[in-house]
Image (cartoon, rainbow, N blue to C red):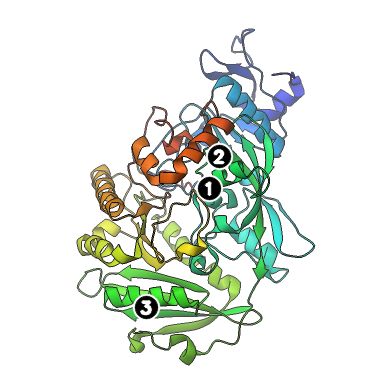
Amino acid sequence: MSHTPSRRALLRGLTVSGAAVVGFDPAARSWAVTGSGSGPDLAEIPPLDGTLVIDEASLAAASEDFGHLVHRRPLAVLRPGAVHDVVAMVRFCHTHRLPLAPRGQGHATDGQAQVQGGLVVETATLADIGPLTPDSTTVTVGAGARWSEVAMATLAHGLTPPVFTDYLELSVGGTLSVGGLGGQTHRHGAQVDNVSELQVVTGTGESVHCSATRHPDLFHAVLAGLGQCAVIVGATLRLLPAPQTVRHYLLPYDDLRTFLDDQRALAGEGRFEYVEGQVSADADGAFRAYTLEAVAYGPPVGPAPDDTVLLRGLRHDPTGVERCDLPYYDFLDRVAPGVEELKEAGLWTYAHPWLNLLLPGGSAAGLTGEVLDALTADDLGPGLVLLYPLLRERLTTPLLRIPDDPVPYLFAVLRATPPHDTATVDRLLTANRQVYEATAAAGGTQYPVGSIPFTHADWRTHFGPAWAHFESAKHTYDPRGILAPGQGIFSTPASGPSRQPTPGHAEGT
C-alpha cells in the first residue's frame, strides 16, 4: 500500500481476543497478531473507521446464510464505518488476490454471499437514509438499509418506493444485486428498474457514481449483476406518492388455468396496484388450491376502492373471498407476524432449498402443473408456493433475464426442511435442477435467489445476449476476479466446505 497505518489505527481497526492484528501474511494466507512472531513481509492493513474482525463467532456467522445449505469460511469480516473502509479493503484484496463478497442481511439460499478464505463485507453498517431531493422524486440510501427502514422514512413524507419484495427486512444492496420482484412489478417493473443512480466500489477499489448516462456500462453491469463487477454501497431510488390505506383481497380458485388467465388479465389492465398469487394444498393434500392476492390503493393515490368495479369479470369462488382495509405500511409488512412465528417455533433456521423460476406465460400452466402434481406437503414443509404475473415491457434492466413472453410468471417453491436431513436436501436440489432444465427448454429462466445447481456454462446460457457485455464489464471492473465468487458465474467457487447442512445454526438473515 502507498500509506502506512498508525499503530492506533491498527488497534482500532482489527482485534481478536484483545490482540492487535498487525498485518496479513500473503504466503500463509492468514492474519498475524501481536506476539505471533510476525516477519517483515507482512502486508499492513489500511486504517479503518470500522472494524475488521476474525473472531470465531463472526467467521461462523459469515459462513452461513438463510439457505443453511452451503458453508464457506472467510478469513475476516469487515464492518465498515464508512464507504472509504470498503474502498480501502477492496484495494487491499485486489492487491493480494483475496476473494471478497458483500453481505447484506444474509438472506441468500445457496452461498451466494459467502467466500472461502477471503473477506466478507457486511454492509449493514452502511444504512444511512439521506434527505429527499428537492423535487421529492428520489432518495439516496446506503446499501445496508433495509427496505422496512426506507419505507418508514419515505412515508413520513407521504412517499414510497414503487416496488417491494414481500419480506421487507432485506437490504437495498442485496435486492438490487438480483432484481427485486414483487406484486407491484406488473405496474412499475422490478426494484432495479426504479434506480436512478448507484454508488459502487469496483473490484479494483475505485469509488464510482454511475447511472444510465454516467458510466452506463458499469451501471447496467451492477443492477441485477449478482455482485460481479462492483460492491453496491449506495443507491438513489425513485419515489411515488403513497396511499394512506389499501384494500387487500384474497380470491380463491380451484382451477389452475382460470387462476392464471385472471391474473394475466389483471396484469394487462392495471386494475390493481399489486397482484400476486399462492398455491396451497386442498383438503385431499393435493396442491390444487389457488389464491389470487390483489390490492387496490386508496386516497390520495386512488379513489376509495369499489368492490363491484374491482372484482367485475373475475372467475373466483365468490363464497370464499377475504377482504380487509389496511394502513399502507401494515400491508407492506404483512408477512412480519408469520416470520416471527417461524422464528419462535425454530423453523426459520430450517434449510431452504428454494426453487425460483421465471416462466413464459404460454407455458406457465403446463410447467407449474407438473411441479404441483408431484409436490407433497412434506417436501414443501413450512414453506410457500408463489405464482404471479409480470409484464415484460416493464422490465428493462439487461441482466435481469426475463422470458421472451409479454406476461411471464414468477414461480417460487419456497421449501423448508430440517437442516440435518441431508438426504432430503440433496433430493430436493436434484429436483430443482430437473425442473429448471424443463423450464429452460421452454424458454424460461431462473430468478437467481434460489438453490439450483448451476455451472459456468449454465450462466452463459442464462445471460444469453447480455453475456458479452457482462463478461467485458467483469474484465474491466474486476480484472482479478475477486468479487462474489460464491455465485460461480465466471469461475468455480473456491474450494471448501459446502452443502453440509447441520442442525442448530444461528439464523443468518
**Closer to the camera: disc 2 or disc 3?**
3
The quadrant of the picture occupied by the N terminus is: top right
Residue 443 placement (x, y as % from top left): 32, 54
The answer to the question of whether label 2 and label 1 lie on touching residues, with beta carbons closer than 8 A, is yes
Residue 284 occupies quadrant: bottom left
Query: Of the residues shown, which amino acid type is indicated by label 2?
Result: Pro
| For marks 2 and 1 on the same chain, the one whose residue lies earlier in the sequence | 2
| For marks 3 and 1 on the same chain, the one whose residue lies earlier in the sequence | 1
Name the residue beneath numbered marker 2: 102
Crowding at mark 2 (Cα within 10 Å: few <14, some 14-19, many 20+): many
Crowding at mark 1 (Cα within 10 Å: few <14, some 14-19, many 20+): many
Image point (36%, 47%), residue name:
451
From this viewpoint, which residue is outermost toward the right?
A: 134
Image point (69%, 39%), residue name:
83
What's the CA distance linking mark 2 and mark 3?
A: 40 Å
Query: Of the residues shown, which amino acid type is indicated by label 3?
Result: Asp
What's the CA distance linking mark 2 and mark 1?
A: 10 Å
Q: Secondary structure at mark 2?
A: strand
Q: Secondary structure at mark 3?
A: helix
Position of 61 relative to 450 (above/below): above
Depth check: 35 or 61 in front? 61
What's the CA distance linking mark 3 and mark 1?
A: 31 Å
Residue 489 occupies quadrant: top left
Query: Of the residues shown, which amino acid type is indicated by label 1?
Result: Ser
Name the residue beneath numbered marker 1: 177
Position of 349 relative to 393 (above/below): above
Name the residue beneath numbered marker 3: 262
Residue 247 placement (x, y as % from top left): 52, 81
317 left or right, relative to 18: left
